Structures are given as C-alpha cells and as structure tokens.
Image (cartoon, grey):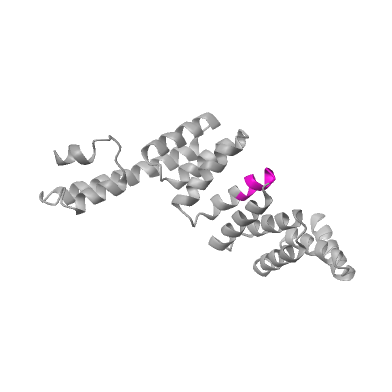
Amino acid sequence: AEIRRRFSSGTVTTGQIIAFGVTGGLIPCPAAITVLLLCLQLVHLGLERVREVLATANSLAEYRQVAEKALAVREDFPDAHVNAAIIFNKKRDFDRAEHHLRRAVHHRPANAQAHAMLGHILRDNGRVSEAITAFQDAVRWDPRIIDTRVELARTYRIIGDLTAMAAAVAAGLALSPTHPTLLLMSAELDFAQGKLASAWRNYRCQIGRAHV
C-alpha cells in the first residue's frame, strides 16, 4: 500500500528511490538496503549505457532517439540535454537547442561545455549580450578552455568593446602564450590603438607560422 501510494504516478526518480529508502519505506526489511543500492547501481549503469550508445550513433535520427529515451528515463540527465541540443542545432532548430542547453546548465551549473554552446547559439541569433553572459559563465566554470576565451573575445569585438576584448585576449594568452588566434587578435587590438610596431610583429609572427 505504501509503495502504491508513493509511486502511483508511474514515474520514479533517483531522488524518490533514496527518499523512500531513508524515510522508513524500506528500512524494516534487512535486505532493503541491498535492494536500494542495486536500484541505484542500475540507474548508473543505464546512464553509462546511454553514453556508449550516443558515442556510436550513426545518424542524427538515431542520436536524437537515444537522447530522448534517456530524457524520458531521467529528465535531469545533463549530458542527454547537451546531446539533444547538438542535434537540434544541426537541424537549425535553435529554439529547441537553446531549451535543452538551459535545462543542461540548470541541472549541472558547472557544465562549461553547455554554457559555451549556448553562447554560440545566442550569438548566431543576434542575442549578443546574452551570449557574452553565457561565454563568461563557461570561462568561470572552466577557465582552462582557451577556445571559450577566444569566442568571448570575438563576441566583445562584435559590440565594439575593445577594452573587454583586450582583457579576454590577455587572459587567454596568459594561459597559452603562442595561441595563433589570440595573437592575431592582440595584433588587431594593437593596430586599433596605434601600436603599429607591436601589431606588425605579432601579425608577421603568425603569417610565418602559417607557412611552416
């Protein structure tokens, strides 16, 4: 009767399984804890299997089907939301891609990849201020990803904020002093500020590397 009452909706989350176990629903039975742990392990194994299938999917349709099945089992599975967003972005369904990315960062705020992807979609659709916030969040959660700093600098360039662009470029170069795109951006900023010698030096350096 207790089980029927608590799970009458037919949908059971990991949190409900744990709550049912620790609030007395299963405690009277000595084997209950073992059953609870087995259930949680099955959830974990199921999600790992989803990741494997997603990695080997041969088409967007198959990829989308697996992602949707994963979300049907667990809506709070951030990786499935990211994978669904990739699919919808490729299909140019940007509204649904944005929806899944926002769900991904809601369930896992530290997901730098999802923040960065969201920044790309927002920028490509003219929502530059929101894109900057998304790229800033990506950098905040994982400052080691240089490409995110590059995209942040590019987005500042769109709105003509050269001061912020320079700060983003400098922060990126501090982590990767020879990054070609950041050095070219640094040259671009130097040209804009009239620092011709420095700008030409960085520019020629990158031209030389392009021919190596």
Is 205 inside the magenta-drawn segment?
no
Work out whether 187 lies above or below 18.
below
Q: Residue furthest top?
A: 61
Q: Assign the N terminus to one quadrant of the image.
A: top left
Q: Quadrant of residue 180?
A: bottom right
Is residue 59 something one can see in this rendering? no
In-front residue for pair 57/90? 90
Work out whether 55 lies above or below 110.
above
Work out whether 170 lies above or below 12.
below
Left or right: where 103 falls relative to 28 = right
Horizontal and vertical percent position of residue 65? 47, 31
Left or right: where 171 falls relative to 14 = right
Q: Quadrant of residue 185?
A: bottom right
For image coordinates 18% across by 40% down, the residue present is 3
Q: Which residues are magenta?
A: 119-126
Q: Assign the C terminus to one quadrant of the image.
A: bottom right
Work out whether 49 lies above or below 203.
above
Q: Main secondary structure of the magenta part?
A: helix
Is 122 inside the magenta-drawn segment?
yes
Horizontal and vertical percent position of residue 116? 59, 52
Left or right: where 176 falls relative to 186 = left
Horizontal and vertical percent position of residue 163? 75, 66
For image coordinates 64% across by 60% down, the residue present is 146
Horizontal and vertical percent position of residue 135? 62, 56
Is residue 95 something one can see in this rendering? yes
For image coordinates 42% across by 38% down, the residue present is 71
Q: How many marks?
A: 0
